[in-house]
Amino acid sequence: MESLIALLQANSVEAMVGLGLLAVASWAFLKKSSSTLKVKDQLPQSSEQSESSAHDIEDPEKLDVVEEAKAEEPLVEAKKESDRSIFFRGLQKSRALISSSLTAIFGGKIDAEALEQLEELLIYADVGDLSFEIVERLGKASKQGEQDLKGVLKERLIDLLGEDEPLRPPSHSPHVILVVGVNGSGKTTTIGKLAHRYQKEGKRVMVAAGDTFRAGAAEQLKVWAERSGAAFVEGEENADPSSVVYRAIDKARSTGVDVLICDTAGRLQANQPLMDELRKMVRVIQKQLPEAPHEGLLVLDSTIGQNALFQAEGFGATVELSGVVLTKLDGTAKGGVVFSIRKRLGIPVKMVGLGEGIEDLRDFNGAAFVDALIEDSPIE
Ligand SMILES: Nc1nc2c(ncn2[C@@H]2O[C@H](COP(=O)(O)OP(=O)(O)OP(=O)(O)O)[C@@H](O)[C@H]2O)c(=O)[nH]1
Ligand SMILES: [Mg+2]
């Protein structure tokens, strides 16, 4: 298996190049289009103070507008490609692990040994302890004379994923999306792709740099904002992230933003002070918009396989999660973790990241995903 993976290191990651046009425009243009705001102060840090109301926070009208980003020229439309073929391309590593072995297993006699091999294979692809259940089902079907065992396997896998659940359609203005996850899971990149997607749909988008911790984090988000044409709000380095989202909501409301996406610093789910900081962010958001965040997205790096489950549990205890974005599915053989996430945690995988490019974010499509894992060629 190891050598098989080693052979499959070819990565179809599209390089992120060309940051494009960055024009400084007028304040008047801000009202119509995108903006960059700088938050100069911080919220109090103590826990009582963290419960502070809007009165404790400086009048947002006093915010300095220091710079303004203009949308890039319209990006070249990605060629329309079906979900099936995109998933097929993205999941080549996971498929390489599963599909050829499946062909060998289903091509021969389905005996106890073949089923054991299949279970090992599923475990290796990080389907987790559901593997046993799946293999048991196949064993039964085989005994009952079922010929199309691959079909049974597919059906079971699609079943495990349940109904596809896309992102909630924005029904409030602003529709607030809070994005959380451990360090390096792909939060900022996902926000950039998502901002681009909403902008393309004609929505007015703002992104808030709630990661005030890591040097360069705000700058990274700003680059994505410029690429997508989204408005951008940031704080000073080490500012309280709650103050950044507070002001972003304020600004989003006063400028008629449709979708506000809040970035957060990467944190380990076991780090209590940082998880408390996240709780505080949610409280501060809810002071202004009791229904928000309207979407709590957990970004999980699919290359970590079953560890994703622990992360999801930890974050789920802190923030109400409405969905998972599974990133880097293009570079992993552990795509099987999707099944455990859905089954064990009940949180839908709403989107997947299939590369580093701005278009490499897709709605999760269970049937296309399963096909891409186990079929030899795309089924259109
Ligand atoms: N191949 C691939 N790479 C991805 C994908 N999503 C993100 N990345 C890469 O993963 C790395 C980390 O992405 P970031 O978006 O900075 O992750 P983050 O969660 O914001 O990281 P922190 O802010 O440090 O916590 C970057 O090199 C991204 O280009 C994906 O779907 N596929
Ligand atoms: Mg980040």
Image (tube, grey):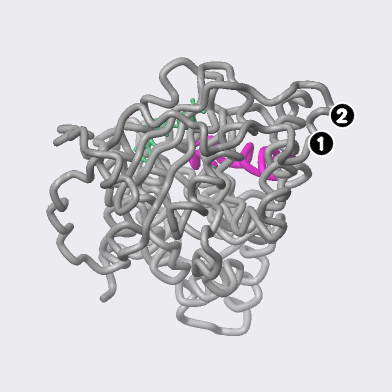
Q: Does dot 1 land on a helix, a strand or a loop?
A: loop
- For this orientation, the residue located farthest to the right is 48
Q: Which residues are magenta?
A: 300-314
Quadrant of picture, ligand 1: top left
Q: Which residue is mark 2?
A: 48
Nearer to us in this view, 33 or 293: 33
> Is the distance from the Cβ of mark 1 to the nearest ligand 1 atom less than 8 Å?
no
At x 62%, y 63%, the residue is 135
Which label sits on residue 83?
none
Q: Does dot 2 land on a helix, a strand or a loop?
A: helix
Nearer to us in this view, 360 or 142: 360
Dot 1 crowding, Cα within 10 Å, few <14, some 14–19, many 20+: some
**Residue 373 left/right relative to 283:** left
At x 71%, y 46%, the residue is 319
| Magenta highlight: main SS | helix
Q: Which residue is mark 1?
A: 51
Q: Any magenta on residue 307?
A: yes
